Amino acid sequence: MFIRKLAFSNFAARKARVALTVAAVALSVSLVVSVTSGYASLFEAAFRYLNLYMGSTDARVGRMNDPMGVPGSVVDELRRDPDVRRADGRLNLKTFIPDPSRPQGNRHIQAVGIDRPGDQRASRLLIEPGGKWFETNTGDVAVIDQAAADVMKVQVGGTFSLPYAGRKKELTVVGIVHKPAVLAVHFPSMYVPLRTLQDLVGNDQYVSEVQIDLKGEANAREFAARWQQKLAAYKPALQIHLASDIRQQMDKDLQGIKMLSYLGGGVSMLAATFIIFSALSMGVSERQRSLAMLRAVGAFRSQIGWLVVFEGLILATVGLVIGVLLGYAWVKILALWFHDIFTAGAVISWGGVLFGTAGTLLAALAASVLPAWTATRVSPLEAMSPLSKPAGGGAPWRVAVVGAMLISIDPLLLFEPWVRVMDAMGAADPAKLGREWKFYLHFALGLPGLFIGFFLLAPMFVWVMERVAGPVVAALLGLRYAMLRQQLSSGIWRAAGTAAALMVGLAVLIVLQVTGHTLLKGWKLPDKFPDVFIGTSGLSPAQQKQLAQTPGISEIMPISIASPTLGDSPFAIGATMLLPDATMFIGVDPDKAFRMMELDFREGNSKDASARLKEGGWLIVTQEYHELTGKTVGDTIQLAGKPFKIAGVVWSPGIDVMVGMYDMGDQFQQRTVSSVFGSLADGRKYFGAERAYIFAADLAKGVEREELFKRVKKEVNDQGLQIGDVREIKYKIQSGLFRLLNLMSTVAFAAMAVASLGVTNTVMAGVRSRRWQFGILRSIGVTRSQLLRLVLAEAALLGLIGCALGLAAGFEMSADANALTGVLTGYRPPLMVPWRSISVGFGAVMFIALAASVWPAVNVARTEPLTLLQAGRAST
């Protein structure tokens, strides 16, 4: 009761301060809730559609990336199984539809052949008014989604042409289904009668997968184990996947994005932590006399400490309640605004709410520790006369030493040769174990130590900046430095807390921008590089010859791709993308490759490498591969049991475009780390790479890409044909990724917005504690304008300290992130610093600091001297 009454009386006396602190906490919690709930709403929309698509399917049988992988006899056999309630074969075919808005003139679409009327799973999809589902497994009809309807400009009753491998079907639209826009935009789809799609393919004996519903009493695990043995007899083997496994894998794939959403909210919460600390520190400093009086009349040290902790928890709890409601309101507004994307409506992320709740309460406790300890150290006799003791002028070096030790933890973790440590401990795979230890310790110890360390360094930054930048700021604002001296260091911890809050946003902005630009700018194209890359579904030797004779192509180089362990089929190459340790073999003609492409050799040279590749048994590896494995020129590596020697090490940016042009179900990613380059002859001899999927071509002068596309399509009639200008591809990829990078940077600016409340709080506290001093200054001739500029100068110093802390923390985090990239991939590109973006962040911090101080500065400048003097010396 005693503590509660004192806390609420303090809140009543400082309403503006309490409101600002609660607002900062509420804003940070609302960011946590809105970011995590926004992701949860998108996930729910996607899962709702996928669940409708999968229906009550208990298991699936199929073969990865093989549209004709399951014999029809498997469907019949499954239907006879006593545990199976029903089994439906489906044909999933990736083809294309005309799209005039694209340079290639077409767009990929997923065509799904369903066996109606038995297969009723798709009927759960919402069909637009005026449409209906077809009820037979034959007929030239289709149900399309809204994205396909928009691309083809057709409605119910309209017709379109569906091509595949030189054949085509004229289909009539009988219905349009609606699915979440976030999925429809990227994955347009249609449903066609099964027999109709099989007729288009030219094979009625196979399907892509079998969807299985089990009887209620069946044991799914036992059923899967029994059928796995049967399916293994097929060559290549078929696989069975339970629905629970599929959903678990999908959830696992989304964990990284979920973690990013929590990380984004955590950044704003960190800023709020420093603001709570700053607010409590101010309260302790301002109430030294009242706390001393409490001690004098019998209050225990523990009661004084609990008073401060209780105040912090009350502020955090009120802010927490408001923040949760505000965060949900933001998501609700977003869901109503973009209802076509958030088709499941606003979904609250209880994990985000729990994270925000626990994080806020822990932050309040952590922020209360030092102020509470300071309050318990108040001496009744000394605190009764706070002006009798001058402010200390010594540097806070003790906490600075501790801070320096803490910020050194992350670099030591990432740069320490953990492989040797793990090897000495007898680990079976020291390299892998060392990478895992570095990764987890970076997030568990490194980052927390870094932020806490810079917070402890903040008082030293305040002390130094006040002496170094103070005279400059005073001169710029037309003030005497004596008026500004020790204004921040007299309340050094409250200034440190505010500067640390400003630091968070700028540091996060720097690490995002530096890391993003480092990875994106590192991809450069050499001066001599093919004009275009032509991606195909695999050309025979005769078709390759036709392609080389196409008018407008001056030189062409076939490129084969194979997995040394799985072969060169689309299934094998797709599977290689899912295996983190798999190596990809890229076959080229050595003479043409070195004539058409200028490769940057880091070890070896092009002349020797070309000669060795023609000999056979030699490879060129990338710099990333070299850094990851330590292999160099002359060393031997094993591919599928065959020894190869390294002929050269090249810097590979740009060459991975050859791989990226090959479309593998939108799952293909850049794999330069695990790619090796050899001759076409070795690809055929050792890995069965008979067909070329990609062709690098130089064009005759004046040839337009669209014109060339028409000619090539006419010559080889390849339905999967794609032509891409490498420089245009690079521009599109980079512009898209830079937009994503800038979107992620909004989290940093949100943290700065939270910190602005802390700046206002700190400046208000400084003004309140010095009202009597300001009254004396006004009485001896200091003008309103000078008083206004004095308060603005204090805010400017706070902004400069926040910038200095942010720059130091941001660049250390960027260097650590670059080292972590090297740990995980073996590739450490040189750091690229985007000074323009950093300058924007620097300017934002200074603007926030100055703007947040305008109201307190104007308020005190307008107050009459007598009113200021009436505050008395105890106001300090």
Image (cartoon, grey):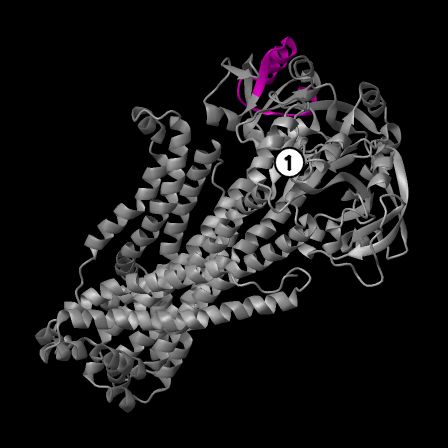
Tell me where the magenta segment starts and ends, as one range: 594-620
Q: Amino acid at mark 1?
A: Phe
Q: Where is mark 1, residue-wise? A: 668
Q: Look at the image and say whether residue 613 sits in the magenta stretch.
A: yes
**Which residue in the rendered view is the most extreme toward the top?**
615
Q: Residue 532 at what x, y percent from top left?
A: 74, 33
Which is more toward the observer, 47 or 742?
A: 47
Residue at x-position 33% and y-position 28%: 422
Which is more toward the observer, 188 or 723?
A: 188
Whether residue 316 appears in this view of the structure is yes
> Crowding at label 1, few (<14), some or many (≥20) Cα neighbours within 10 Å?
some
Q: Residue 814 at what x, y percent from top left?
A: 43, 45
Decide if residue 42 is on the left or right side of residue 471.
right
Which is more toward the observer, 859 or 78?
A: 78
Residue at x-position 28% and y-position 73%: 311
Which is more toward the observer, 290 or 244?
A: 244
